[in-house]
Image (cartoon, coloured by chain):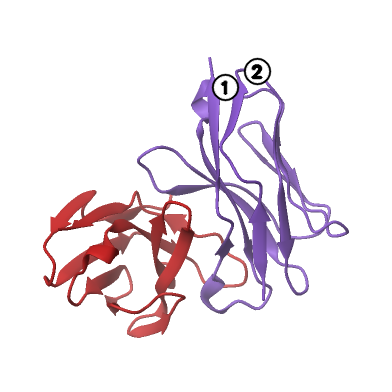
Amino acid sequence: DVKVTQSSRYLVKRTGEKVFLECVQDMDHENMFWYRQDPGLGLRLIYFSYDVKMKEKGDIPEGYSVSREKKERFSLILESASTNQTSMYLCASSSGGVNQPQHFGDGTRLSIL
Amino acid sequence: GDSVTQMEGPVTLSEEAFLTINCTYTATGYPSLFWYVQYPGEGLQLLLKATKADDKGSNKGFEATYRKETTSFHLEKGSVQVSDSAVYFCALSPLYSSASKIIFGSGTRLSIRP
């Protein structure tokens, strides 16, 4: 089975801090994704990556950046955390090719105080 | 652009009831269609998928049929259990999607009473 591991289940940070969320997958997948999930808004794509060092903006990239230095690891960075970034963050991965399903981690619930 | 519309919840049923969660989509060509399930405190899990018209995906007693003529992919289960309580997401992967991007519906929360 595909395993997508997010480094923290719960995280509390302060406004203005630089926050790192880490995600690792063990299936040699080409594609990796970061979403945030908020009540009433569903899943919204922040950034995705289709190869090492490659990244593309999703629907809501403002206030975020990403890093993919190794194939198995995809990091989401909040440059200067704000309270409106309090949310559930979900990482996913998928193999290359057309119409492949995404496999998700268990999520990180991030609170910005 | 491509989109997914699913019935709003919450949906509350008694155990052993029949379940239908409606999902319709708008897309160019023949996208792949998915149902994902999210149990409390967890990430999303792939429940089933269908990749072409008239395909039926099935898993854990759930079924959904890819209907091109009605652009629908409704989720059904004949007899639900308390353990089926979760949020269900309908999703599609556009035909020419870069990096297998997926478009998700807004989710339907299902609660099953014992």
Residue B81 — which label? 1
Chain A shade in the render: red
> Local crowd at mark 1 within 10 Å, few (<14), some, or many (≥20)?
some
The x and y percentages for residue B111 are: 53, 29
- Specify the quadrant of the image occupied by residue B104: bottom right
From the viewer's side, name the closer residue of B3 and B59: B3
Same-chain status of marks 1 and 2: yes
Q: Amino acid at mark 2?
A: Glu
The answer to whether A78 appears left or right of A96 in the picture is left
The x and y percentages for residue B2 are: 67, 71
User: Do callouts 1 and 2 mark residues in contact (Cβ within 8 Å)?
Assistant: yes
> Local crowd at mark 2 within 10 Å, few (<14), some, or many (≥20)?
some
* Chain ID at mark 2: B
The answer to whether A70 appears left or right of A29 in the picture is left
From the viewer's side, name the closer residue of A38 and A57: A38
The answer to whether A104 appears left or right of B20 in the picture is left
From the viewer's side, name the closer residue of B91 and A98: B91
Residue found at x 40% / y 37%: B40
The kind of secondary structure element at disc 2 is: loop
The kind of secondary structure element at disc 1 is: loop
Mark 1 or mark 2: whose residue is earlier in sequence:
2
List the residue tagged with mark 2.
Answer: B16
The answer to whether A55 appears left or right of A83 in the picture is right
The x and y percentages for residue B92 are: 64, 62
Q: Which chain is purple?
A: B
Residue found at x 11% / y 70%: A17
| Above-or-below relation of A45 to B55 | below
Mark 1–mark 2 Cα distance, whole angstroms, equals 6 Å
- Image quarter of the N terminus of chain B: bottom right
Residue found at x 28% / y 75%: A70
